[in-house]
Amino acid sequence: MQMAEKAFDVPETLPDDPQALAELAGRVMYERDPASQALQATLDTIAPGEASMSMTVRADMLNGHATCHGGFIFALADSTFAFACNSRNQVTVASGCTIDFLAPAYEGDRLTARAVEYSLAGRTGIYDVHVSNQDGKPIAIFRGRSYRIKGNVVHPEGQA
């Protein structure tokens, strides 16, 4: 089944509660997100302006030094950033980001990325994402800048 053919269980009206709306937007986004699914990343929590995702470092994610390739750590942080900045059901994209790698991650490590909204003004936002391993050791810090464009992540059933 191709992504366009997937049926999403979207209510006829969207929830008024910001938390319920964040959860719905997160679920629908994840169903449409083959990149996060390929990482086998899980969306652990989501709230307005916040998200947490985790993934286990696999053998196919290792570089020539037997540590997790930075691109996979970046992808986890970037996905978590995306869920946090789209959690209000407004389509938001990245306008830029930086990452600092603090320590290596190894095969079998369970990495958790926690994104928190630092600033939201008009169409732009700044989000900090902290990536740590299963022992709470800091692995990376990512800062993303977002830009809200037109549209919503989730539309009530029957609306485009």
Image (cartoon, rainbow, N blue to C red):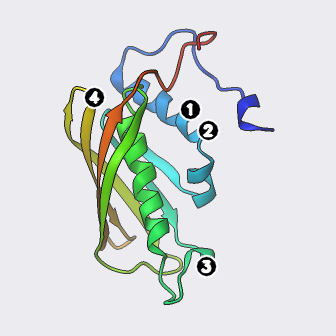
- Measuring 53% from the left and 72% from the top, which residue is drawn there? 57
- Measuring 30% from the left and 60% from the top, which residue is drawn there? 98
Dot 4 corresponds to which residue? 123
Using the numbered discs, state the Cα–Cα distance from disc 3 to disc 2 in whole angstroms: 25 Å
Cβ atoms under marks 2 and 1 closer than 8 Å: yes
Image coordinates for residue 101, horizontal then vertical, percent: 32, 73
Question: Which label is found at residue 31?
Answer: 2
Q: Amino acid at mark 3?
A: Ala
Question: Which label is found at residue 28?
Answer: 1
Relative to residue 108, is residue 123 depicted above or below?
above
Using the numbered discs, state the Cα–Cα distance from disc 2 to disc 1 in whole angstroms: 5 Å
Using the numbered discs, state the Cα–Cα distance from disc 4 to disc 2 in whole angstroms: 25 Å
Q: Which one is in front in this view, the residue at disc 1 or the one at disc 4? A: 4
Image coordinates for residue 151, horizontal then vertical, percent: 46, 21
Q: Image check: 64 left or right of 7?
A: left
Q: Is residue 47 visible?
A: no
